[in-house]
Amino acid sequence: MHESIRHRLEDLLSAGSSVGGHSSPDGHLASCSECSSEVAVMQSQGVLLRSLRASEELEPPPGFYARVMQRIEEAGVRSVWTAFAESRFGVRLAYASLTIAIILGSYVVSAERRDGHLRGQTIVAQDVDYAAPVTGDLAHQRDAVLENIALRQQGTAR
């Protein structure tokens, strides 16, 4: 298509066959078969587009939106965790893990209460004068520490 027609193409297609101006495109279209065939194709496409606009509102077939949403979900990025969480096995494993955690937690709490750690008891340091001084070589230090531990557990001091 030549430049003179390309610049006035919108006016030519909207006005019909003649466009006012200092050089008439009608003469060029009559002499140039390439430009006249392109303008004719564009005019026929314009007629088809206007007929589409005039027709009643077209509705998509039933289930169209459901199929679109299904394809969007299928195309979505899936991680290992989502595949695991969506399976029956993943849900059952989560429930089993939660049950085991509750059982173990209740066992730990009951064992700590039985041992006296969770009763709210405060340990007060007793003024005990230990008779076994921790001095000497390594063997004597070890024996003195063990003796002090034994005395401490009995609650008496020598």
Image (tube, rainbow, N blue to C red):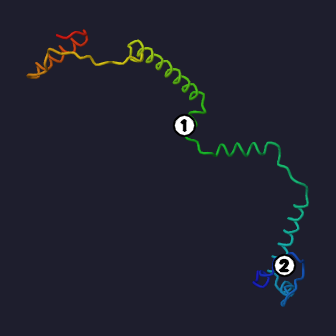
Which residue is found at the position 36% from the left and 18% from the top? 122
Where 84 falls versus 14 (above or below)? Answer: above
Q: Do the residues labelled 1 and 2 touch (CB within 8 Å)?
A: no
* Most distant residue in the front direction: 127
Tag of residue 81: 1
Horizontal and vertical percent position of residue 9: 81, 78
| Residue pointed to by mark 2 | 11
Which structural element holds mark 1? Answer: helix
Tell me where residue 21 sits by quadrant.
bottom right
Horizontal and vertical percent position of residue 157: 19, 11
Question: Who comes first in sequence, dot 1 or dot 2?
Answer: 2
Mark 1 to mark 2 CA distance (whole Å): 60 Å
Where 21 falls versus 48 (above or below)? Answer: below
Three-letter code, disc 1? Trp
Q: For the N terminus, give its image quadrant.
A: bottom right
Q: Nearer the viewer, residue 121 or 91?
A: 121
Horizontal and vertical percent position of residue 120: 41, 18
Which residue is found at the position 82% from the left and 82% from the top? 33
Where 82 falls versus 99 (above or below)? Answer: below
> Left or right: 87 with respect to 139?
right
> Left or right: 32 with respect to 143?
right
Q: Which of 81 and 34 is in front in this view?
A: 81
